[in-house]
Image (tube, rainbow, N blue to C red):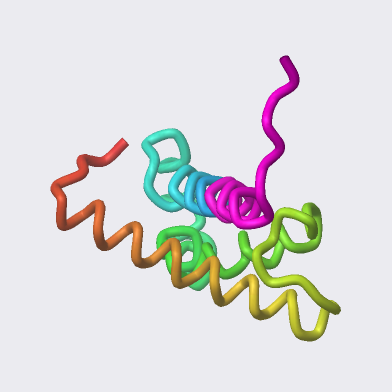
Amino acid sequence: MAPASRTPVQEGMQTLASWTLLVYGATLIVTGSRLTEPLRTWLARVWPWLGKLVSCPMCFGWWVGAGVWAVLPNLSPVPGSWFIAAPANAFCSSAVCWILHVVLARMGADDL
């Protein structure tokens, strides 16, 4: 039996969920995991501005969103040309990363 085809709404929700997991996962690994803690500490000592960037989920999430749009444009939720879609996806990613960070922190999520 052939699998049932998905509706455009189901496709869109799957794409949005995949994009959200990708941008937040990548951001969390860099900004909050124990794995990258030595890198964050070193960057904060050598280049304080870069150390702040890799410690802030909202800031780093912006760059992850822009990078995901550049590498995987079909996965990004805001389609279009680079001068509209790239910053729009970056801002969406920043907001998603910050919201998920705050929600998980309020729920008592431990450090990784």
Q: Main secondary structure of the magenta part?
A: helix
Q: Quadrant of residue 76?
A: bottom right
Left-right relation of 6 to 111: right
Q: Residue at x 52, y 53 (%)?
A: 20
Q: Is residue 29 above or below residue 58?
A: above
Who is closer to the viewer here, 97 or 4?
A: 4
Who is closer to the viewer here, 90 or 37?
A: 90
Q: Residue at x 41, y 43 (%)?
A: 37
Q: Residue at x 35, y 58 (%)?
A: 100
Q: Quadrant of the C terminus?
A: top left
Outermost residue toward the bottom? 83
Any magenta on residue 72? Answer: no
Q: Position of residue 35 (x, y in %)?
A: 44, 34
Outermost residue toward the front? 1
Outermost residue toward the right? 81
Outermost residue toward the top? 1
Q: Position of residue 71 (x, y in %)?
A: 80, 54
Left-right relation of 8 to 91: right
Any magenta on residue 9? Answer: yes
Who is closer to the viewer here, 33 or 95?
A: 95
Q: Is residue 60 above or below residue 86?
A: above
Q: Residue at x 79, y 59 (%)?
A: 73
Disc tally is 0
* Range of magenta residues: 1-19
Q: Position of residue 52 (x, y in %)?
A: 44, 67
Q: Position of residue 10 (x, y in %)?
A: 59, 49
Q: Quadrant of the N terminus?
A: top right
